Image (cartoon, rainbow, N blue to C red):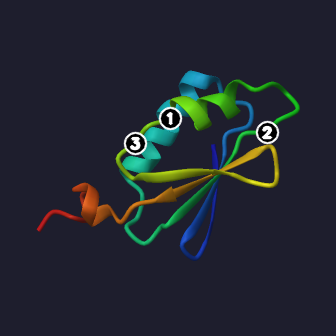
Amino acid sequence: MTEYRSGSVVELDIHGETEYSAMQQLTRWLSRAPADVREVRVIHGCHGGTVLRDMVRRKLKHPRIASKLIALNPGETRLILKDSQKTGGKHGIR
């Protein structure tokens, strides 16, 4: 998985990963996501099959995910994140 950050938006490319590996990596990344990240653009591709797309859109669950948006690019899904303080994440513990 490759990562690119621009401000409060992070792009995670999971091309070439297995469903299991991608799920584990995304879940781990979301659990450790910086508090100031508000959106994650997951690049899963669309021409090599639908397994990764369906995993991200249907199976991926995490307390930081507020909503999932289908992007204009069919190979991408946007994850809108909740404020980590509201989910009790490591940045929300006082």
Q: Nearer the viewer, residue 91 or 64?
A: 64
Q: Which residue is mark 1?
A: 60
Q: Quadrant of residue 86?
A: bottom left
Compared to residue 4, the image places residue 43 above or below, namely: above
Residue density around tag 3, few if under 14, some if 14–19, many if 20 or more, within 10 Å = some
Give the amino acid type for the residue marked by disc 1 in the picture.
Answer: Leu
Q: Which mark is residue 43?
A: none
Give the amino acid type for the residue marked by disc 3 in the picture.
Answer: His
Residue placed at 43% from the left, 49% from the top? 30
Q: Is residue 44 left or right of residue 55?
A: right
Label 3 residue SS: loop
Residue density around tag 2, few if under 14, some if 14–19, many if 20 or more, within 10 Å = many
Q: Are marks 1 and 2 in contact (CB under 8 Å)?
A: no
Give the amino acid type for the residue marked by disc 2 in the picture.
Answer: Gly
Label 1 residue SS: loop
Q: Earlier in the sequence, mark 3 or mark 2?
A: 2
Image location (x, y in percent) of residue 11: 65, 57
Q: Nearer the viewer, mark 1 or mark 2?
A: 1
Compared to residue 26, the image places residue 71 above or below, namely: below
Residue placed at 51% from the left, 37% from the top? 25
Q: Which residue is mark 3?
A: 62
Q: Which residue is mark 2?
A: 45
Image location (x, y in percent) of residue 49: 81, 24
